[in-house]
Amino acid sequence: MGRDPLANPAYERVCEERPGFREWAEGKMLRCSPAMYAAMLLEMTATEDRLDALRTLSIPTLVMVGELDTPFLAASARLAQAISTASLVTHPGGGHSPQFEATEHWRASLHRFLGRG
C-alpha cells in the first residue's frame, strides 16, 4: 500500500501520552517469528480479492477506520459499501489503531453497534 500506517500524528500523540507505548507497539513486530512474518507478508500480497464474496453477507457488520489511517480509508469505504448491512465509522483523530488513538469514540461506536444485537 506504499505507506507505513503508523506514520501519522495519532500514533505519535499516543506514544507521547502513554509511556512505553512505542516500545510495546514496536516490540510486537520484533517478537514475531521471522518465518511467520515472511509467511504473513506473502499471504497478504498473494491473497485474491474477496470483496465480491463479502457482498453476500447479510449480518450486521461494523467497519471502523481512523481518519488518519490514509492507506485504509478507501478500502474501508469499499468494504462498507459492498456489504449491504455494514456501517462505516471513521474515528476522528484516530490512526491505524483507533482503539488506542481515539479510545472514547471507538468504544462508543462499538457499544452502539453491539447494542443493536
Image (tube, rainbow, N blue to C red):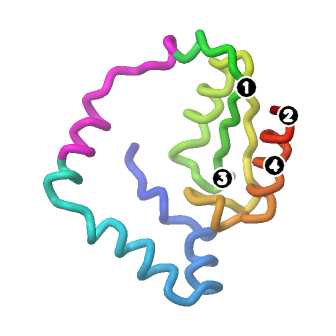
Could you tell me the amino acid type at mark 1?
Answer: Pro
Question: Is 26 situated above or below 57?
Answer: below
Dot 2 alpha-carbon crowd within 10 angstroms: few under 14, some 14 to 19, many 20 or more = few
Could you tell me the amino acid type at mark 4?
Answer: His
Question: Is 1 situated above or below 58?
Answer: below
Labels 3 and 4: the sequence-earlier one: 3
Labels 1 and 3: the sequence-earlier one: 1
Span shown in magenta: 39-53
Q: Which residue is mark 4?
A: 111
> Which residue reaches farthest bottom?
19
Percent coordinates x, y for residue 22 in the rendering: 47, 79
Asked whether the residues under the numbered discs 1 and 2 touch, taking CB atoms below 8 Å apart as contact, a structural biologist would say yes
Labels 3 and 2: the sequence-earlier one: 3
Dot 3 alpha-carbon crowd within 10 angstroms: few under 14, some 14 to 19, many 20 or more = many
- Residue drawn where x is 65% and y is 60% of the image: 99
Residue mark closest to the camera, 3 vs 4: 4
Dot 1 alpha-carbon crowd within 10 angstroms: few under 14, some 14 to 19, many 20 or more = some
The chief SS type of the magenta part is helix
Q: Which residue is mark 2?
A: 116
Q: What numbered label is drawn on residue 66?
A: 3
- Residue drawn where x is 70% and y is 35% of the image: 62
Residue nearest the viewer, comparing 24 with 16 = 24
Percent coordinates x, y for residue 105 in the rendering: 80, 58
Residue 45 within the magenta-colored segment of the rendering: yes
Quarter occupied by the C terminus: top right
Instruction: Tell me the CA gap for discs 3 and 4.
Output: 17 Å
- Residue drawn where x is 85% and y is 34% of the image: 116
